[in-house]
Image (cartoon, rainbow, N blue to C red):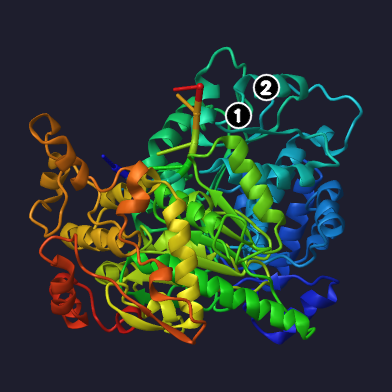
Amino acid sequence: MFNACRRGPASLSRVLRAGSTLHLQSARPSTLSLITQCATKPSIESRWVHVASQLRQQATGAQSVPRESVQNQQQNVAVTKFQELIDYNLVHPNVVNEITRGMGLHTMTEVQSKTINQALRGDDIIAQARTGTGKTIGFLLPMIQNILRENPDFATRKRYSRARPSDIRSIIISPTRELAEQIAVEAEKLCANTDLRVQVAVGGNSKRAMLRKMQMEGCHLLVATPGRLNDLLTDPYSRVSAPKLTTLVLDEADRLLDDGFSKDIEDIIQLLPDRREVERQTLLFSATVPKEVMHLVRRTLKSNFHFVQTVQEGQQATHEKVPQRIVTIPGIENYLPCLLELAKREISKAAEAEAKGADFKPFKAIVYFNSTANVELAARIFEELRAESGAFGRHPLHPTEIIEMHSRLTQERRTRASDRFRRAKSAILFSTDVTARGMHFPNVSHVIQMGTPPNQEQYVHRIGRTGRADQTGEGFIFIPEHEIPEARRRLRGLPVSPDKSLEASKLDMSREAQLPAGLATSLDQLFAAVKIVDRDTKIKAYMSCMGQPAASPVDNVQALNRWTKFGWGWPAPPAISQSMAMKLNISRVPGINIQRNRLFEDRDAADDLNGPSRSREGRLDNFPDSRKFGRGGDSSREFGRDSRGMGRGGFDRRDRSTGRGGYDRRDRGMSRGSRTDDASSLF
DNA sequence: AAAAAAC
């Protein structure tokens, strides 16, 4: 696993005879490697002895060696077992023991080995490694040791500690509150036998309570989200400051340095002590590092920083062990039928394996949507599912839990949702990208993405919620036909293979069809649930999709209107304002429902255009009522629709005229890139 | 009228 370059068996065996299992790191620079190369190359043996003795002195806190001379050493020795950190006196046993005995970890992952060895020297680092490979310990361990080296007193737990809120040595910034909490839990474990205090500063909870805790216990390691951290550092009454800051960590660094966050981060850096006066180490970690943020990385780090890259160029950013399937579907209305079919299939697959006593993995899935409103709608509908008609029917997926997670929940509910999902044996977590990065939920079997992710990085992070450590997992992504050109661009180069195993993915819901019994039942269950969910939730979901950037707003609104008609049974799509219609240039889309000025309109006419009001929903919805088709218990059943209410039959005509060929032709015109790469052959 | 993130 370790990218070792063994140069000559003789020298290697000499190293091994010396009683170590040290590996020698390749000196060959990778294309993206920015590791500063040493001009002189001493022999391997002398290099080894040199570094080992240097590090020994560092670990004991000896100040006899100036930092420059440490930096000037050849840096090609890497420890790969946690125990060796004790053996070579590199990290205090009180910290390492928590990992080896407490967590049962022994061998470092590649990113851990590389970053721990490098960061112990105090240099700035940006580290890129695949998801689920233990980056957190990779920065916590050297960070803690570097504090202990400067402050040996903290290494043992004392009965009384006199830490204050201004004792902060390390600040770790995370893009989400839950990730901050998760990092803090890990940090507390590592610090359990030391005198170091860990505090969390995130939004959504009581600032006063947090500050009180901080005053009482003091703080050495602060894990924070940008907003609250900024708030604390600017609030003179908080008494939170970091005059002795030695380490700054940005987890999910590319996210923190991109457009949405970079302003916050720059403000925070302005509030920290000047690096020229208080020397500090900056560590950046992420599974993805897009080129666009590299200039910000360079600005944030010292000029001689190290780029620790364990994903070689040309290699997949995702794990080979996570098969990723792409399912193209006729429209948005197919999302939930597909999900229900997939869930039922995987749940019974697991049950069968369990019954046979075979190895099995319960169905535990995260389902990503691109907007909060869509997460809410899908979760509501899945909560309302019943196996039989009537309110007292059992849930068809029982005992699989249905959980919802996004930022519009109160912080209390967010915490409860992630705790519940963490503990659940079998569950579906409907989520926004709030859980896409860094979050560790044990045993996630499936990551399911509904629609095209905002960018390729986000796809990689979402997939990374499964197949963590040595576990396996599967990825599914559902792409409605109108998104195919955009999806092709954003997923370019990813190892996704087409999957047509789901009946519901082939179902054109605008047409009549003979359906297999299982699919017919699932559709009945879904339609019954859709009917119960209130109208407002649906409109919000519709509007949220309208606001998303789309390659073609016209195709987008047509797909959305089709969804309201065949997914919800609405005679007309929700009304949108004139100004929005103008802005998106969709005023002339057939069947579009533009809000007219009510002052000059007949009230009832306006109501009709807005679709049925809540009180009349049951009567006006033109749902295919399963009872209309009879329930014969036969193996197949007619599933029919009419196309009334769409105005001039817009969709039917469009459906016939835009086949796959239409998309291909248009895409050829729009895409500038090569068409010979992986993704282009996949759709 | 689009994730997230401060009060």
Where does residue A334 sit, x and y in percent of width and height? Answer: 38, 69
Q: Is residue A650 left or right of residue A221?
A: left
Crowding near pointer 2: few (<14 within 10 Å), some, many (20+)? few
Mark on residue A48? Answer: none
Q: Is residue A621 left or right of residue A657?
A: right
Query: Which residue position holds label 2?
Result: A209
Q: At x 42% / y 84%, what residue is drawn?
A: A500
Return the residue nearer the eye: B7 or A28: B7
Where does residue A625 sit, x and y in percent of width and height? Answer: 39, 66
Residues at marks 1 and 2 on the same chain: yes
Could you tell me which quadrant the C terminus of chain A lies in? bottom left
Task: State yes or no: discs 1 and 2 in contact (Cβ < 8 Å).
Answer: yes
Return the residue nearer the eye: A238 or A491: A491
Where does residue A86 sit, x and y in percent of width and height? Answer: 84, 56
- Which residue ends up furthest to the right in the rendered image? A159
Helix or strand or loop: what does disc 2 sit on?
Answer: helix
Which of the 4 quarters of the picture holds residue A161? top right
Alpha carbon separation for disc pair 1 and 2: 8 Å
Q: Amino acid at mark 2?
A: Ala
Using the image, name the chain to which the residue with label 1 belongs: A
Q: Amino acid at mark 1?
A: Asn
Mark on residue A205? Answer: 1
